[in-house]
Image (cartoon, grey):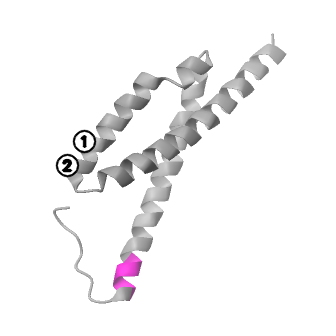
Amino acid sequence: MEWVYQCRNLDEVRSQIDALDRAIVSLIAERGLYVHQAAAFKHSDAEVEDGKRVDQVMRRVTRLAGELGADAALTAKIYRTMIGHFIDSERAERLRLVGEREAHA
């Protein structure tokens, strides 16, 4: 990181971490909303579990981790967990949408 606030005490460190946690959780929520939208454009579980896309994302975030000074192993672990969860969520949403379409057909 090019610029990080130099904290003067533990309370300031914790305050900075709390602010980052809020930003991270907000971004995870936003990412989830896009995953939710993606389900409407996919027509099979194979499209939901697109291994090529997962590999593409993993390569990109690993590269970003290196560029930004993040722990690459931690970043990969977090992303693999997050992607797995979002695949399950997207699969459930796609099935809900299919059921909705069939009910209206």
On screen, 19 above or below 46? below
Looking at the image, which residue is at 41% across and 23% down?
52
Kindly identify the amino acid type of the residue bearing the numbered disc 2: Glu
Looking at the image, which residue is at 71% across and 25% down?
95
Quadrant (top left/top right/bottom left/bottom right) for the C terminus: top right
Looking at this view, name the residue that lies furthest to the right.
103
> Residue 78's mark?
none
Residue topped by disc 1: 63
Q: Residues within 10 Å of mark 2 (few under 14, many from 20)?
A: few
The foreground one among 24 and 88 is 88
> Residue 67's mark?
2
Tell me residue 83's x, y (percent): 50, 39
Q: CA distance from mark 1 to mark 2?
A: 6 Å
Is residue 67 toward the left or the right of residue 36 in the image?
A: left
User: Can residue 13 be found in the magenta stretch?
Assistant: yes
Q: Residues within 10 Å of mark 1 (few under 14, many from 20)?
A: some
User: Can residue 97 be found in the magenta stretch?
Assistant: no
Q: For the stretch drawn in magenta, what is the main secondary structure?
A: helix
* Magenta extent: 11-15
Tell me residue 81's x, y (percent): 51, 46
Is residue 90 toward the left or the right of residue 25 in the image?
A: right
Looking at the rendered structure, the secondary structure element under dot 2 is helix
